[in-house]
Structure formats: structure tokens, C-alpha cells
Image (cartoon, coloured by chain):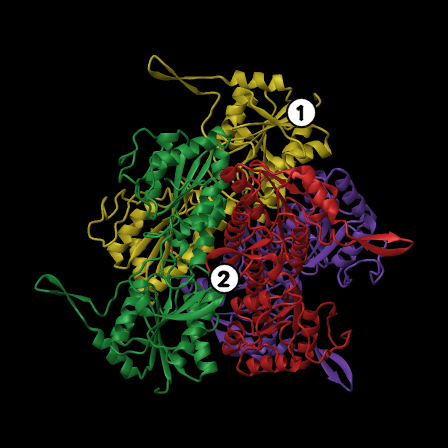
Chain colours: A red, B purple, C green, D yellow
Amino acid sequence: MAEIKKIGVLTGGGDCPGLNAVIRAITRTAILEHGLEVVGFVNGYDGLYRGNTIKLDLDSISGILHKGGTILYSSNKTNLFRMPFTENGETVYKDLSDVGVENLKKEGIDVLIIIGGDGTLTSARDFHRKGVKVIGVPKTIDNDLTCTDVTFGFDTAVTVATEALDRLHTTAESHHRVMCLEVMGRYVGWIAIQAGLAGGADAILIPEIPFDINKVAEKIKERREAGKDFSIVVVAEGAKPVSGEMVVKSVVEDSPDPIRLGGIAEQVSADLEKLVGLESRAVILGHLQRGGSPTAYDRVISTRYGNAAVELAMEGKFGHMVTLKGNNISSVPLEEVIGKLKQVDPEGELVKTARALGISLGD
Amino acid sequence: MAEIKKIGVLTGGGDCPGLNAVIRAITRTAILEHGLEVVGFVNGYDGLYRGNTIKLDLDSISGILHKGGTILYSSNKTNLFRMPFTENGETVYKDLSDVGVENLKKEGIDVLIIIGGDGTLTSARDFHRKGVKVIGVPKTIDNDLTCTDVTFGFDTAVTVATEALDRLHTTAESHHRVMCLEVMGRYVGWIAIQAGLAGGADAILIPEIPFDINKVAEKIKERREAGKDFSIVVVAEGAKPVSGEMVVKSVVEDSPDPIRLGGIAEQVSADLEKLVGLESRAVILGHLQRGGSPTAYDRVISTRYGNAAVELAMEGKFGHMVTLKGNNISSVPLEEVIGKLKQVDPEGELVKTARALGISLGD
Amino acid sequence: MAEIKKIGVLTGGGDCPGLNAVIRAITRTAILEHGLEVVGFVNGYDGLYRGNTIKLDLDSISGILHKGGTILYSSNKTNLFRMPFTENGETVYKDLSDVGVENLKKEGIDVLIIIGGDGTLTSARDFHRKGVKVIGVPKTIDNDLTCTDVTFGFDTAVTVATEALDRLHTTAESHHRVMCLEVMGRYVGWIAIQAGLAGGADAILIPEIPFDINKVAEKIKERREAGKDFSIVVVAEGAKPVSGEMVVKSVVEDSPDPIRLGGIAEQVSADLEKLVGLESRAVILGHLQRGGSPTAYDRVISTRYGNAAVELAMEGKFGHMVTLKGNNISSVPLEEVIGKLKQVDPEGELVKTARALGISLGD
Amino acid sequence: MAEIKKIGVLTGGGDCPGLNAVIRAITRTAILEHGLEVVGFVNGYDGLYRGNTIKLDLDSISGILHKGGTILYSSNKTNLFRMPFTENGETVYKDLSDVGVENLKKEGIDVLIIIGGDGTLTSARDFHRKGVKVIGVPKTIDNDLTCTDVTFGFDTAVTVATEALDRLHTTAESHHRVMCLEVMGRYVGWIAIQAGLAGGADAILIPEIPFDINKVAEKIKERREAGKDFSIVVVAEGAKPVSGEMVVKSVVEDSPDPIRLGGIAEQVSADLEKLVGLESRAVILGHLQRGGSPTAYDRVISTRYGNAAVELAMEGKFGHMVTLKGNNISSVPLEEVIGKLKQVDPEGELVKTARALGISLGD
């Protein structure tokens, strides 16, 4: 095996608490344990394309362990295998991955550690297929990557959502209201169901289980009859009504307050107000879930992932992605990970637990 | 002066961290210090109207100091001096305050402590004018009441908004974005300016200073030229463009992401994306600012207010509202407080400080 | 299998964030999913001995999900199989477990769910051996129980310790100091190593790896030479010097400040001040680690554990303890769990990661 | 008035959340508003003595607003007017303040802004007496400086102490214990009384009111008789028994757990265990109160103080210290501030409120 002397790092996709902790662990392990050089590509694959790098040494990663975001910045959409260009007024796509390969050679980089979600890791696999020595580190705030129990950032997102639920509870109770919190999760309901369990939600609506708003309304009415005239509903942004239709169409004319119907939580809120007769309000957490300081849990996983990525590189396990299984760090070929979606099992233990506790899944 | 034996308490208007701490301090002071009885009216003035009360003793207020919301619940809109009824298909308003007076007599309540904002305290004053022995406790999360330096709940709201800004900062930086945070304040910019100062905002838009979106855009461009290609904008919900118009009208056709233009922060965000050319995102904090556990600061003020309200009652200072001036608890006649709005002074020290630090106020 | 109609619950040992969430999940699952009755024994085994119970229904467990402590209270040391009595001036021990069995019968309890650590679960096993239908739920803030990846409370303890490290960092840096934080862990270093990794410690001393204070001092001197004249040391309360001796004996005469040498962190701090020549301070976290609201992570595990305990009971898996393996809830016979200690592996991945990052383990 | 072109800044004494926010506001106001140059002295007066400076520009203060500690470092004890030297085996003190004055001239510094507590500001006043243009910024985590309502850092300390009390409450309740929390305050009880009020303490012991441990024990027994068999005691580190004596002398022989009697909270805890018969535990918050990120409140005050310090300099108000009175920033001559101690008034409203709520002050 050719000796490894220099490692490159890039972060792709949306930001995620723990990215800096991964970068720090990679850099420290590479330098202190293996005497390697480390450079980071700026703005994800865009930096790989432009050859835009910064040196990563002990100074440049000092004090970043607890910081959100990524010191290497990110570029959500750059895909070197399919770069868009305008020719004769039309968008055409070109494979410019060779430019990336060339830039790695120019920089003398032996191994490229790529930290990202499914999209970013798809390119990682494609670079590996082209012969680039690649190690993947899974990153998904939604927790939708297979082959690993969990990834960093997810615990922080659940924590932020749970703190929000704690705050909304008292308002809901004091004002006899339904409070609907929209959390991230376009395709999966992991944040919704875990935050919902942690925050004592009464209904949890996730993409994996299409909901019937009348069932949710029934649940809230039941509570009302039992003397609890307030309810908390957690809605994943990708939750969908089973019929594709909601009660309130687009403008709420019969409500004293103007209600914007821009997100699913606002739809759900408007419908519940109409169906149940309790005041209902929606809050959309949005970017609050993905920024800021990672939880202790995420900092530990991130640090272990970064360390493991360098160790995988030293062992020559190229094309692999770091994974966490139980308490053990291991790895899996990127080929096995890509293009799959880890969804909440509608018949699984988490959902069953929610149901057993009396939480409505909207079905 | 007739002896006081029994005190009534009610909380009106939107919920506010610290309400329970006030109720607890009133109850403990009344019982332990003065041997009084205490009852609470349920759902604010609605409870006064219906004679709906619960006994407040040491047990019922145990463990509520740190809890958000109000154990007495609240009714946002009930005004006994102007109750709406439908007669012949039209809404007519009747003064049913005598029902409240009657219920106080029935309950044997000597003094009524009313905790609320301008609306709630207006009724308090009106009851005082009718001869009811009333003490007011100021409550406004927006900090818009005059005659007192500050009220409880405001510090918690500023804290929640500042934590949100801390989280948004790292996303903004990692993605070269403009992040716009909408905070409470329909008529006043107190939360916006304090959270903006505490959270390191680059622009703060408040109702007191109509903004020119082009000026905000210039500020962000300036930062970009100085190498900072991200910015944080805090927008009070009541901030208004100077011309009344925004750049992006109602649907953002040229953005890759659908942007809802439902609140002022979304308008500001859409405009800035167009004017500056950086991705821009909006987050609306909404109810997260008014629920949940009060800060230590708010718990201390609330406790002092509750204690002081009972002391004012014992001193016979009816028709007065508790105030905080510097470190001192004092009081002022409700007549002097009602109907005034404490706004941020556009020429005052807070605004000047913001400007001196290089923060744009949008003008 | 005899039908189950009534479940008993008790919590033993030190308090632990998440206990109430377990109790809540047991109660809700038992009542809502299976139509059972539930009673709690007050003060752990002491309540079983005295027949001191309270009914657990939906009302009694309302609002406790996020609360620290246990609504059933706990008794650290009661062991019905070995109750101490004074006879003729001497302490004699008697097996009074039959009293417990009798009380279960009197109450008509079919299954007893026992939540506790190794000591509490040893009695659980012993009751099972006597024919009592027992289900165990693991509880250990130290994370020292085998057969399960993790238990509730641990994540909260690590979180509190990490927040403390974040706070101490800035003081250490501003004052060129060594700050030593003592965390829980008499026999195991789980909290120390995870908080140390999450909080960016420079040295982590754990019971599993006896430390040489001179090695720790060397590490700090190295950092100083590299321009970092401050350091953070995390010390598990059970950390031991390899030789059994420390440099500073019992009173620090040559220090300007009086240093109490009451805990190992204070010993370590005093020694490092002497050996390195930097001011050094100790902080002992103590009870702050085990009280208060559980993290979202701990609330989710606790809820799943509580639910699973009831399901195990319904499946007739008596004598089993709930476990978490990866993302899966499962169970294991208590016989396999008792009397073992899950320690940090001195050659394991966590320790290797710490070393690779340049953290001293004191050896 | 001679034109001001360059400002120097130094931070003295113990670290305090908000110091960096002050430095940032000074630097931004000086550069952006007035076009001045700014330098910082490293390690407080030690840097002034050695001429050890760093340039403060917009880059060097970027991202420090929310960081604890001080980027200028601090030196607790250096006093240029009384520098200790060893001559013939004896310590002699020399006034070397001229060296400081000389270094200011060499650096071309027109005004020196000094941020510190009573000790640091005493030297500030002395430099002013020597003709140096000095502006003071009050800094005291203990809140013991006169002439200003409050200073930065205090709110953060109270917040940390209150969070600790919230955590200890659940342990105390679950285990029927007395929990004693020692907070900062050698000479004043501000943190103790405010955190005690905010955290629902049952007894608060402060330096201003010597305590009788039997009175505290009575209070706890009273609670026990009323069915509350746990209590929370907040003890300022400078609290003193009225007689100078405690019940438990120095080693607790009759306790099952070894109790270290190193601080006053441990004395109080040991005594209460003996006098009341409930298990009792002490926690010493120590440095956790002064490190870490400042609260939003402290960040706002710090920012306003920093801005005001530069404005005072521009107005020529040398020898003045910035103050906060109510909502207004103002100033006062250092001569009026020095050597006074702002104590909690034993007859004041805060103490009366505590008593009225049933809290024992130990007298």
C-alpha cells in the first residue's frame, strides 16, 4: 500500500452540529497520531473544483469543538459529476469530476475524507469508483442514513425540538390551545418521533404514516373530554394527509387571527382549530434545529467519527464510510449506503411505544 | 381603613414567564406574612365574570416558581366593561362589570390583585374607578409599559431570542447566508434591539424606525466587501418599510426554494436575497419567546412584584401598580400608566450604541 | 400463564434523571395499552417492606416526563434480604424478604417492576429466585451496568459535566490556569472520558487507568511550551495514583490560597500547581450531575424502557431486565447482569481516540 | 482638550462573563464611530508594566461577544503602586506606577480604559491622580460595587446558581435530604439572595446577617412537620455563624459518609444533618459561576458599558466610571466609588421579601 502523507477534508450539504468536531478530530489524529499533513477544501465540492484549500493544523482547529457550523463552509448543491452550464440558452450538465481528481493530485492529497449526507456521499462513491482514495463520514441531521445507528447532529436537533416543546407546553396549557410544532424531516420522521416522545406530545405526524386530520382532531377532543383542554402536536415537515386534502383550503376567513398556510404545521393547526374548536397555533422551528453548539452526545460521536475516518484511511479501507453500531465504531462500503433511506418503521418499537403511551400517529 | 382578610388574584392577556412566580409570591406573602386568605380567578376576567375561583394555599402554589404559563389560566380578550353579544344578528357590547363587582362581594374578597398588560390593567383601572380595591402588577413580554424600568417575562424573551441568534450565526457563516430572525414586538422594538445587541446582529429593524430595505442591503454588501459574506438581521414583527413597499411582491419566482411571504421577516429575507445576491432565510420565533421556564432574573422580579403587591394592599395603596425603578420596588397610580406605550427612543442611548457598533437600523 | 391485572413499581438507589419518565411510561402503557392497575412503592424497598404504596394513574404521572428525581422517592440502602437490627448492642442482619413477598400478595400485585442499579437489581434477582414475578429496568448514572449499551441518566450527567467544562475553559484560558473538574465514577470512567472528549479536556483520569501525576504534569508543560498556558483536567472521583501517593501530602503550606484536599480532584490540582507552576483550581460537580431535568436522549430511552418493561411483563419474561442494544430494545436475564461492572476498556476505541487526539490518560 | 487618537484597554481581577463583550464594544465604537486606534494590555496591569500590548481591530474582536473570559487575559494581583520585591530576604514594596505611565506614553495612548473591580479601579483612580486619562468600567461578579445598580457578570452568576438549585431540588425531594449550595460572595450576599429567591430556597445565609445554625435547623424541622422532608439552603461563601462556632467541630465521626469540612456550606450541611436528622449534602459551585458564556442581559450591559466608556473618553470625563441607573447609562467619579462595599441591606426590600415568603435568613 502506498504511504499516506497528506489528507484532504471536505464538508458538503446543509450544516449540522458536530461538523467542526469531526474536522478537529481528523486533524488532531492525523497530525498527532500519524504525522500527516491535512488540508481542507473550502465550500465543499466547490472548493475541490476550484482547488480552493486551507491548511488544517493544530492552530486552525483550536477552539472549534463546541462550535456549530463548519469552518470549511459548505456548498449545498455542487455536484462535479453533473455541473450545470448554460449553452445556447439551455442548461446542459457536464461531468467535471476529472478537475477534482486533478486538484487532488496537484495538492498531493493521498486520501480525501468526505463528510456529508446521501447526496454528498454519492459523489464520494463516484470519486471512489474513479480511483480516488475516499473515506466517508455520515452526516445527516434527519438521521436518514442506513448502516449506522445514528449520526452526529441528530441528537442536537432532537434536543432543540424538545426544548421548544417544553416551552410550548406551558402556553398551550395556560391558554387552552393546540400548539403545533413543525420539525425537520422531509422524508423521515426521526426528529418528530423522538422529540415528540421526549416532549410529551399528544400527536406525532410523520412522513412514514399518512395522517387523517380527523383522527388527530378526535384525539384532541378525547383529551378535552378527559379534562385536558390543550394539546401538543409535532409535525414533521414531510408529513402528508392520507387523502392529500386538508379541511381549511388556503385562506382562513373565519379565524380572528390571520393564519398563514405556508407549511404543513400551519395547515394542521388551521384544520384542528376548525375541527376541534380550540385556538390553535403553529411554530416552525426551521433553521434553529441545525445551527449552534452540538450536544455532548454529538460532540463525542463526531470526535469518534473523525478519529475513525483517519484510522480507516491508515488501514487502507478506502471507499468505506464510518458507522456506529451500538457502542462500536465500524465501517461499511459506501456502495451499500448510497441511495437508501432509513425510515421510521410504522410497525417498529418506537411507533408502538408512542401508540402504547396514547400518542396519536394520525392514523 | 377596613381590615383586609381575603385577596383575589387574576392573570390576564397572553402568557408570560414569571406569572406563576408572581402568584406564588402573592400567596406566600399573604398567608405567611399577613395571615390572609387567597383565591384565584380562573381564566382571567372570564373567571371574575363567572365567579370561577380556586383556593390558593401553600400546597397549590408549591413547585410552580420555575414553571412557565399561569396556573390560573388566562383569557386574552374578555373585557367586562365591553362584553360582546349578538342581538338581531349584530354584535352589541354591554358593560357587565357589575357582575364582577358582585362576584367579588360574594367571595368576600377585599382586594383584587390584577396581573396583566395595558389591556388588562385598563380594566383594573376601571374597576378601581368603580370602587373596587385593586392592585396592578405589570406584565408585558414586549416591555412596552411605562412607569416601570422593566417587567417580568421580557428578560426570558430576550434570552430565547439571543439563543436563537447564537444558533443562526453558525448556519449563516457556514452557508454564506443572510439569516433573518423575527421576534415579538408589534409596536415596540425592545426585544429586537436587546436581542440584536446580545446576539451580535448586523441589522435591527424596529417599529420605531421605519426601514429602507435598500439601506439594509447596502450594509450587508459592505460586510461582504469586508470579507464577511453572511449577516444576521433581527426584525421586530411590527417593523415597517419606510415607503410601505417591499421589493419582492408576493411570490418569489426566481428563487430555487419556495419562500413564504407571510411575515415581515420573510419579506425582508426575500428582498435581501434579491438585492444582495446571497441566499437568505427567515425564522419566526413566535410562541417560543413567551412560554417556558423564566430566567433567574425574571423569577426574582416576579417574586418581588408579587410580594410588593400584597404589601401595597396592606398599606391601602389601591389603584396603584407595582413598579421597578433601578433596584427599588415602588408603585404608581394605574391612571398614570394606562394607554401609554413605552417605545424605544430612536435618539436614545440603546439605538446610539447599536449605531456606534456598526449595526444598521435600516435608516 | 396467570393473567396480569396489577403491576407494582419501585425505584431504588441514587436518583437519576429519567426515573419519572420510566414511571410515566410504565403507567401509561399499563393503563392505556393493557388496562392494568398500577401502584408504586414509596421509598424503594423500604416501601415494599412497610407496604407503603400510592396508586399510579394518569393524573398522578401527568407533567412528570421532564422532571428530575422520582415521584416514588428512593431509599439508598434498604436491602430486605439483609436488614440490620441491633440486638444486645450488636448489629445483626436478618432476611425479611418474606415481608415484601407478603405485601405484594396483600396488594394483589402480579408483577413488580424494579428500577435500579446493580444493588437494587441484585435484590430484584433474589426476589425472582423466590418466585416473585420481577422485571428489571437498568438505572445507573455511571453507565456501569453490563448487557446494555447505555442507561438513562448517563447522557444527562455527561451533558452537565460538559457544560461545566465549557464554563471552566474560559476561566482557565483567561487566568493561565489548570482547572480540574471532578466528575462521578467511583469504579468506572464513563462520565469522565465522554465529558472529557466532549469538553476538550487535556487530561482525563479514570479508575481503569491508574495515573502518574508526573505524566499529567508533563502533558501540561508540553502544552505550555506550545503556547497554551492553561489546561483542563477531568478527574473521575475514583481515579487513583499508580503509586498510591501524591506529591502534596495533606496541607498546602506554600500556596497563597488555602486548598482543601478533600477529593481526588483537589489532590490532583494541588500536585499540578506544585509540579507545573501554574495556578490550579478544582471544582467538584457532585450532585449537580444527578439532579434536574433529563436530556431529550434520556427522556426517550426512559420512555422506551418503561414501555418495554410492561411488554416484557405481558410476555411473561420474568426475571429479565430491559436492555438497549444499538437502536433495539431487548432484554436479558437478571442473572447475567448482576455483580458485573462495565468498565472503560483501557485498550478500547474510546481511550484510543482520546490518546490519538493528544489527551493524556495519565499513564 | 487634546485630541484623542488612541485608546488603551486592560482587564484586571478575576474573570467575569461579559468582559469580551465590553472589549468588543469599546473597539467597535472607537474604530467605527470615532476613527480611533485601540490597543489592549495583556494580563491586566502586568501588561501595562511590561509594555505588553496587542492591537485591537475589528478582526481581533470578531466572534467574542458571547465568549466567557477575556481575550486580554488578566492578572489578579498585580498592583503597580505596590510591587513586591525580595531584598535581603525580605519583601519590600515599591511604587512602579511611573513605568506604567511611561509605557502609555511610548505607545502613544491618550486614554486608558480600565475594566475591573474595586482593587483594579483603585489603581485606576491612582493613575488618574497621577494625571493619566483614565475611564473605569465596573466589573464585579459579586455585585458589590456602589454607584451602579448592577454590573455585568452578576446576572450570569445568579443564573448558573439558579440552574444548580433547580437540579438540586429534585435530588433533595427524592431522597428526603437537605442540600446546601455554596455560592460566591465573601463579603456580600447578592448572588445568594437572588439565586435563593429565584431557586426557591428555604434558607439563605449571607455575610450581612450572621446566622444561628439552630434557627436554620428549626426552619427545616418546621417544613418537615408540614410534610416537606427536604430543604434547600443557599450559603454565601462569606456567611458566618453568629457565635463564630458550629456544632460539628472538624471531623464528622458519627456520619456514615465522610464529610469534608472545607467550606462553610460543608459546615452548615454537617451541622444540619446532626441537628435535624435528615441526610444533608453540600455542593460548592465555585468557578462554575464565573466562567462561560454571559447571559443575554450581561451581554447587553457589557456592550452598553463598552460603548459608554469610549463616549466618556470623547467627552473628556476622565477619572469617571461608567454606571447603570435604572435604564440609564451614566457616570460617576472613581473617587466616589473606591473602597466602598455595596452590601445587601438586612432591613431592605430583598431581605424582607425573602422573609415574607417564609425563607429563613438564619437569624
Q: CA distance from mark 1 to mark 2?
A: 52 Å
Q: Work out which residue is located at the far right of the displayed protein and give it.
A: A88
Left or right of B244? Residue C123 is left
Numbered disc 1: secondary structure? strand
Decide which of A301, C272 is in the foreground and name it. Answer: A301
The amino acid type found where label 1 is placed reads Lys
Decide which of D73, A303 is in the foreground and name it. Answer: A303
Decide which of A108, C282 is in the foreground and name it. Answer: A108
Q: Give coordinates of residue A138: x percent, y percent.
A: 59, 55
The amino acid type found where label 2 is placed reads Tyr
Mark 1 highlights which residue?
A: D6
Image point (40%, 77%), residue name: C312
Q: Work out which residue is located at the far top of the displayed protein and give it.
A: D88
Q: Dot 2 surroundings within 10 Å: few (below 14), some, or many (20 or more)? A: many
C55 lies above or below D239: below
Question: Disc number at residue C297?
Answer: 2
Q: Which image quarter: residue D322?
A: top right
Image point (47%, 82%), residue name: C33
Q: Work out which residue is located at the far left of the displayed protein and give it.
A: C88
Q: Is residue B37 visible?
A: no
The subunit letter for the residue under badge 1 reads D
Quadrant in the picture for the N terminus of chain A = top right
